[in-house]
Image (cartoon, coloured by chain):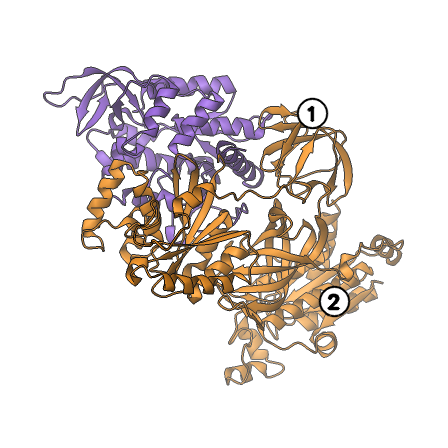
Chain colours: A purple, B orange
Amino acid sequence: MNHLDELEAEAIYIMREVAAQCEKPVMLYSIGKDSSVMLHLALKAFYPEKPPFPFLHVNTTWKFQEMISFRDKVSEKYGIEMLEYINKEGLAQGINPFDHGSAYTDIMKTQALKQALNQYGFTAAFGGGRRDEEKSRAKERIFSFRNFEQAWDPKNQRPEMWKLFNTEIYKGESIRVFPISNWTEKDIWQYIKRENIEIVPLYFAAPRPVVEREGNLIMVDDDRMRLKEGEEPVIKKVRFRTLGCYPLSGGVESEADTLDGIIRETLSAVSSERTSRVIDKDGGAASMEKRKREGYF
Amino acid sequence: MDALLKFITCGSVDDGKSTLIGHILYDAKLLFTDQEQALVLDSKVGSRGGALDYSLLLDGLMAEREQGITIDVAYRYFTTENRSFIAADTPGHEEYTRNMAVGASFADLAVILVDASQGVLTQTRRHTRICSLMGIRHFVFAVNKMDLVNYREDIFKKIQRDIKVLLAEFNYKSAVLIPVSATEGDNITRKSLRMPWYHGPQLLSYLEQIDVSEDPSDAGFTMPVQRVCRPDLTFRGFQGQIESGEAAVGDEITVLPSREKALVADIYEGDRRVERSTAGHAVTICLDSEVDVSRGCILTKNSGAVVNSIFNADLLWMDDIKLVAGKNYILKLGTQSVPATVMNIKYKIDVNTGKEVYADMIYKNEIALCEIVTGSRLVFDTFDNNNALGSLILIDRITHATSACGVIRESVSRGTDLTWHTMDITKQFRERQMGQKARTIWFTGLSGAGKSTIANELEKRLTANGRHTMLLDGDNIRLGLNKNLGFKEADRIENIRRIAEVAKLMNDAGLIVLTSFISPFVRDRRQAREIIGGDFIEVYVSTPLEDCERRDPKGLYAAARRGELAHFTGISSPYEKPENPEITVDTSKNSMEECVDIILKKLESLAEERKN
């Protein structure tokens, strides 16, 4: 077995453990490349059965249009149950990424996720988080427990020995499960190539209308994009290393329009992938840990 | 070398583990520039006065940055031209031993740091012991801070001798010593010019080439079943990961614990049909006949796995709540989950010296050899033969904490190990003969609540109705069967266990058993319920404390109030009320006759319910 085989077998083992032991699991689906890999693994893990749980997309309403059409195409193709959750209250209040900064992320992502998990009563939620993404994630267990307020307590994590996962919880508590904890960005790309997994075309370089903001190239995906004075969208050949809300996702100039091209660029990359995600920078180095304590995935 | 190398770094608090890994990443140009910038920025406010502090790369949690120590395992991923690595950086402090064990359970190799200026310390021994316990068989001792001892060969040689002595105790496959300086970078990725006397490998190049793959396993084929895949009536497959050996279409396999046999009809690796599959793969296996298989069963071929319910295991205790013999837990092994009792603490192993020490309690971070008895048959092997079928965790039933992890040393043969003799005269036969359904009616409540009086009256009424009964109370049990037990916690638990086992035997004889003990703790009553099973009926005599104390038939409350009786339930020791007793009666509200009527009526309706 090579190291991708080992990582694949580990992820499948974890998914099957959850399906066999947790009362009401769900798989978070963010439409990104990690979600595409997670979906692919779930289809393999339970084959010939369909994954025995639904998928949940928390929609902030500010996703790239191409992401939403990709989501709908994929759920149709594989016949999986795709739930969409939007924080209606936040939407009604007009919460948006331009005026509300980190409050936007809290209300439309963190709060929306909590509301969705409570509404459906999910006891375990799969996420595509990887330990190589960010320092506080590097210390999180594969099975990560949330109290009744969905908060994470990093000082009180259950010891995780061998492959023996303790999934006992009380009513109201829940588990976040990260089957691809041990994958790196490079593993993800190599696996996508090996398994021929479909991903959103935004990952490939193409001419797109962008403006430059604080060193990030932001794509003008629809007419809700607010241009600052003097900003004029220009067409550049860009691709995205991570996908989220288009006003918060920085693209990089690139010629990589094939998987091989992306893998080559990733191998020689000079910055880690989260730098192109604008939200991480609010609040300094420890911002992700703070958000996780508050219930962010 | 295509396979991953998973390794752990350990050492005591200031040995420089995080610095070592940080330096490998930095030297091998494995850092992204933004991380490098953050490192320079952080170092300015950090501890090394402006010089790069490589450990800041790894100590991610806010609490750790504040305290300057690593409290939890951090995983780092890096790939050189020759190999992919996962490094688990673990806390060195004794208080966080369990977190170190988490890292060790995941790794194939341990890099143990030894401070050259201090030599082999107690912690070096402890870490080596825990790594070995968790199954690590490959060791690298990085003798760090050589810069602080002027790169002297004699100091390195002395440490080399001490390590050799230390290793003699353990079972290992490879071990090397490398003199390094993590802050200065000597022998980390490049050969140090300051130690010309050293001719061995550098740390990174050693890690790149070491082969940690297991010998082709003699353990035979084993696959614990995780779940049954049944999308429709035409397909039934058993999903799990092959833990040892291999299976091919056409092989005859045995299902444990039932020992039924069947042939392998199909094997899938993920969604791909294959002819054979080997250890490590996640598979779905279909069999040629309708054998009874569910989660927790093990598919085997020529394996050493046994079916038994008693074994000895080394436990690493990880819970703040101490271990006392007799306590009952949920035991998880492979995909099996069963109730289990730690029957007997044989001895504690001093983690520093390896000496066996007598102990009747085990505290957090201690290791002990214990005898464990499971509530139902368990399929297992020794840890040395089969890691997956020889490793376990114990889960606290109330807090749900992972209280311990352990490795099985040996199966224990004892009376109960023998297959139950099939008796021609069954319990059902005896029940029919006596014209009754066997029951254990378990009275619980404060001293003076009226348990014994009611039990006594109930027994008379049952006997008058032609029932066959037996009353167990403090007098006939404490003075005989349990006269060797005192009042400390372990004895209290054992007392209840024996009563429950005796009640169960009498139920098997067809009798209706009445027990009258205060039995104040939820945990103990739950264990009794588990031992006795479906025949168990809990009667809570809920007479309030004031009434019991006012009655005080034996003058015990008065004595307890005077401080003459320690651990007296209700006064100096708690009474935990039953959450869902089958029956509740209160002698301060009803007369004794009424209480007995209530119980008899409830027994009838319960009998109806349980029939349906």
Picture layout, residue A41 above or below residue A196: below
Residue closest to the eye, A160 or B274: B274
Q: Is residue B389 left or right of residue B163?
A: right
Q: Position of residue B547 (x, y in %)?
A: 56, 74
Question: Is residue B605 something one can see in this rendering?
Answer: no
Q: Which residue is painted at 59% across and 60% down in the image?
A: B314
How many marks the image carries: the answer is 2
Picture layout, residue B35 above or below residue A68: below
Q: Position of residue B483 (x, y in %)?
A: 70, 78
Residue bearing mark 2: B458
Amino acid bearing label 2: Leu
Q: Is residue B423 left or right of residue B322?
A: right
SS type, badge 2? helix
Crowding at label 1, few (<14), some or many (≥20) Cα neighbours within 10 Å? few
Disc number placed over residue B233 in the picture, else none: 1
Residue closest to the eye, B513 or B339: B339
Quadrant housing residue B565: bottom right
Q: Label 1 is found on which chain of the structure?
A: B
N-terminal-most mark, 2 or 1: 1
Q: Label 2 is found on which chain of the structure?
A: B
